[in-house]
Image (cartoon, helix red, strand yellow):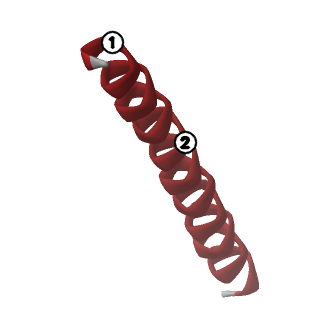
Amino acid sequence: MNRHRGQSHVLGLVLLIGALAVASVGRIVVDSSSLETQ
């Protein structure tokens, strides 16, 4: 029971880090594409 809760906590942490990474990459892509258009 306790181990399962720990696994779900780790999964949530991985999802949070993944979302931050995707947001960072998306922001870099948008910045680079906007620089190219200018």
From the image, tell me which residue sits under label 2: 24
Q: Residue visible at 65% across and 82% down?
A: 5
Q: Position of residue 14 (x, y in %)?
A: 61, 55
Residue 36 location, quadrant: top left
Say which element carries label 2. helix
Q: Quadrant of the N terminus?
A: bottom right
Residue 11 location, quadrant: bottom right
Q: Residue visible at 57% across and 53% down?
A: 20
Badge 2: residue crowd in 10 Å (few <14, some 14–19, many ≥20): few
The front one of 25 and 11 is 25
Q: Position of residue 28 (x, y in %)?
A: 49, 30
Which amino acid does the dot numbered 1 rest on? Glu
Please say if 5 is above or below 24.
Answer: below
Please say if 15 is above or below 34.
Answer: below
From the image, tell me which residue sits under label 1: 36
Residue 2 location, quadrant: bottom right
Q: Reading the chain from its start, which is encountered first: label 2 or label 1?
A: 2
Which amino acid does the dot numbered 2 rest on? Ser
Q: Position of residue 18 (x, y in %)?
A: 53, 48
Residue positioned most to the front: 38
